[in-house]
Image (spheres, grey):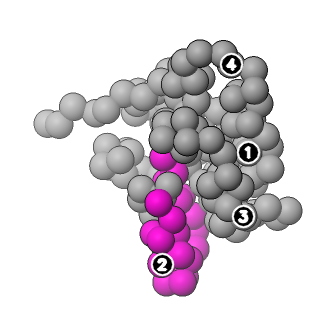
Amino acid sequence: MDEIKKYHAVMLVDDNEIDNLINQKMIEASGICEHIFVHSGARSAIEFLKNIEKLVKGNLNLYLPEIIFLDIDMPLMDGFQFLEEFDKLSDSIKNNCKVVMLTSSLSPQDMSRAKKNLSVVKYLNKPLTQDSIRKI
């Protein structure tokens, strides 16, 4: 059996609190990370990343999530708007954080658009499973 990669931290970005809770429990059960940052909005997730960069002097890698699980359909700022703002962040953040689109969208246009973004490493349909976690 393959060894599961361990991460310092991951981030969940989804406006659905129930999805966040279920995904958080799946991630905890998998044991892939020490910390899980949960955001119910894309704007707060972007602000979190910007604040880490402002506040941390030195090794950002100790504080940044290596994987960001991002929903597409959210109010105020959707997943694609998040990616536009994410692309404006520093290279040190973009190089450390990889985005996994975790969505209920079955739209081929959404999938195609997500895969064109260099920060997106995977496109998964909800719900998150132990098998999908192992494949990341």
Distance from Cα at disc 4 to Cα at disc 3? 25 Å
Kindly indicate the quadrant of the structure image that contains residue 11.
top right
- Give the residue pinned by disc 1: 46
Where residue 58 appears, x then y in whole percent? 59, 15
- Give the residue pinned by disc 2: 112
Helix, strand or loop at mark 4? loop
> Which image quarter holds the N terminus?
top left
Distance from Cα at disc 4 to Cα at disc 2? 35 Å
Residue projecting furthest to the top: 58
Query: Which region of the structure is painted magenta?
Result: 97-118
Mark 4 or mark 2: name the one nearer the start of the chain: 4
Distance from Cα at disc 2 to Cα at disc 3? 15 Å
Mark 4 or mark 1: name the one nearer the start of the chain: 1
In-image side of 5 versus 53 (left or right): left
- Give the residue pinned by disc 4: 56
- Give the residue pinned by disc 3: 81
Instruction: Name the kind of residue labelled 4 in the image.
Output: Val
Question: Of residues 108 and 90, which is closer to you in this image?
Answer: 90
Instruction: Name the kind of residue labelled 1 in the image.
Output: Ile
Question: Of residues 61 and 42, which is closer to you in this image?
Answer: 61
Instruction: Name the kind of residue labelled 2 in the image.
Output: Ser
Distance from Cα at disc 3 to Cα at disc 1? 10 Å
